[in-house]
Image (cartoon, rainbow, N blue to C red):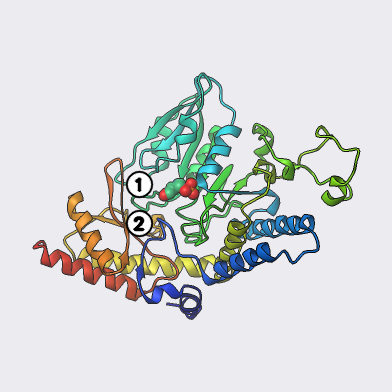
Amino acid sequence: MPASLESVRREQFPALAGKTFLDAACASLAPQAAADAITALLRDVQTYPERSATAFHIRLDAARDATRPAAARLIGARPADIALIENTSHGLAIAAAAIPFEPGDNILVPELEYLQVPLPWRQQPPPAAPEIRLVPHASGTLPVDRFAAVADGRTRAVVMSSVQWSNGFRADLDAIGDFCRKRRLWFVVDGIQQLGAFPIDVGRTPIDILVTGGHKWLNAPFGAGFMYINPAARDRLRPPVAGYLSVNPPAGGWAEYFRTPAITPLQPVTFTPDARRYETGGTGNYPGMVGLAASLDLINSLGPGVIAGHIAGLTDQLLEGLSALPVRVVTPRDPSHRSGIVTFTLDEVAREAALIERLLDARIMVSHRYTSGVGGVRVSCHFFNGADDVARLLEVTGGWLSASGRAR
Ligand SMILES: Cc1ncc(COP(=O)(O)O)c(C=O)c1O
C-alpha cells in the first residue's frame, strides 16, 4: 500500500482497525474529515455564531456551494456545470424530466442495470413515455455493438451505469459516448459505482448527463451527491421546476431583498443558466454537502491515478486468490474493464448466503447481489483497503469452503 494511502487508512478510517470492510459498492465508510466537517457545522447550528439567522442561512448556502468546485475537479468539469443533488435516483429523475421525448421514441438500458437506472423513464405518462429496450450483455460485458444492434431510428438515449453493480464490469464510456454522438442520442451515465475509485473525465468522454450519489465510492455520508450537465446539451433540455435559490440573486443581495417593503411574490426573477438551476433550489442538506465536500477533497488530494492503481492491484490479488478456490469468478477479467468490484459465485444462492453469514461473523463485510442471473458474492476493494484485507477474505472463504466439503 503506498505510504499516502496507508496514513489515510489509519487517520481517516479508524474503524478499519476492527473490521475488514469490503463493501464500498453498498455504502462506504465516511472519512474522519467528513465527520469533522459535519460535526463542526452541526455545532454552529446549535449555537448560531452569526449575528443574525439570515446571515447564518446565507453562510450555510455558501458552505454548500463549496462542494461544487470539488465535484467539478473530480470529473474535469467547470463548477458552473455541476448541480448538487440528493442521490443518484434524484439525478436520474431530473434527467428523465429534462430530456424531451416524442411518442414512439425509445431508450437503451443494459440488462444488467440496477433497478433505479430505468425507473424514472418507466414512470413517465403515456404517450410520450419512451419504450425501454434492454441491451443484452455478452458474458457480462457490454460492447458497443450490442447497443447498435438494439438501436433504431427512434432511439433517443442510452441510459446506463458506468460500472455494473452486480458484476463490476466497467464500460468503455468513450466508445459508447462516441456511438451516441454519431447517432445524436442522449448519453446519461450513472457514475455511482465508479466515481471515487476510477476516474471519469467529462472533458474527454462525451457524456450529456452524469449523476452520482456520494455514499458509495466517494465515501460521503448519505443524502448528498452531484450531477454534471454538459453545457452544450443544456439548451435542448426542458427547463426544470426550479426553486428560489436557483434565481439570480437580487441586486443588493438577499438580506436587502427580504427587507424591501415593495417586493411581491410575483417579483420578476431571472434563473441562472448554470446546472445549479436543476437543483431543488431551497434550503439544502448542508451537513450532507459539507461531508461530501470533505470526502471529495480527500479523493482529489490522493489523486485518481494513485487510487485506481492501488485498487487494480487489490483486484488482481483477489482474482488470483479466487482462482485457487472452488468458485466461479463472474467479473470479466479484462483489466481495462475492471472496477473496484469483484463478484464470484458458488452457483447456489443458499450456499452463497451461508458463506456471507460466515464472513459477516468474522467481521468481513461484503454483499450478495444479482441482476438478470448475473451476480453472487460481491467484494469491493477501495483505496482504504490493503492486501491484508483481501488475504483475510480469501482465507476465511477458503476455510469455509473446505469445511463445507467443496474444496478443490
Ligand atoms: C448503479 C446504481 N445506481 C443507483 C443506485 C442507487 O443510488 P442512490 O441511493 O444514490 O439513489 C445504486 C445502489 O446500489 C446503484 O448500484
Q: Which secondary structure, mark 1?
A: loop
Which amino acid type is shown beneath numbered disc 1?
Thr
Q: Quick one: label 2, few (<14), some, or many (20+) residues within 10 Å?
A: few
Assess whether mark 2 and mark 1 are in contact (beta carbons under 8 angstroms). Answer: yes
Residue at 33% in and 66% down: 316
**Along the polypeptide, which appears first: circle 1 or circle 2?**
1
Residue lying at the far left in this picture: please name it.
405
The foreground one among 8 and 221 is 221
Q: Is residue 104 above or below residue 247?
A: above
Residue lying at the far front in this picture: please name it.
47
Taking the image as shown, residue 159 lies to the left or right of residue 110, namely right
Q: Is residue 7 above or below residue 275?
A: below
Position of the C terminus, as image quadrant, is bottom left
CB of residue at label 2: within 8 Å of ligand 1? no
Q: Which residue is mark 2?
A: 334
Q: Which secondary structure, mark 2?
A: loop
Tally the marks.
Answer: 2
Give the number of the disc on residue 141.
Answer: 1
Q: Quick one: label 1, few (<14), some, or many (20+) residues within 10 Å?
A: many
- State the image quarter where residue 324 is shown: bottom left
The foreground one among 351 and 75 is 351
Residue at 49% in and 65% down: 30
- Whether residue 171 is visible here, answered yes or no, is no
Image coordinates for residue 279, horizontal then vertical, percent:
65, 44
Taking the image as shown, residue 386 lies to the left or right of residue 359, namely right
Which amino acid type is shown beneath numbered disc 2?
Asp
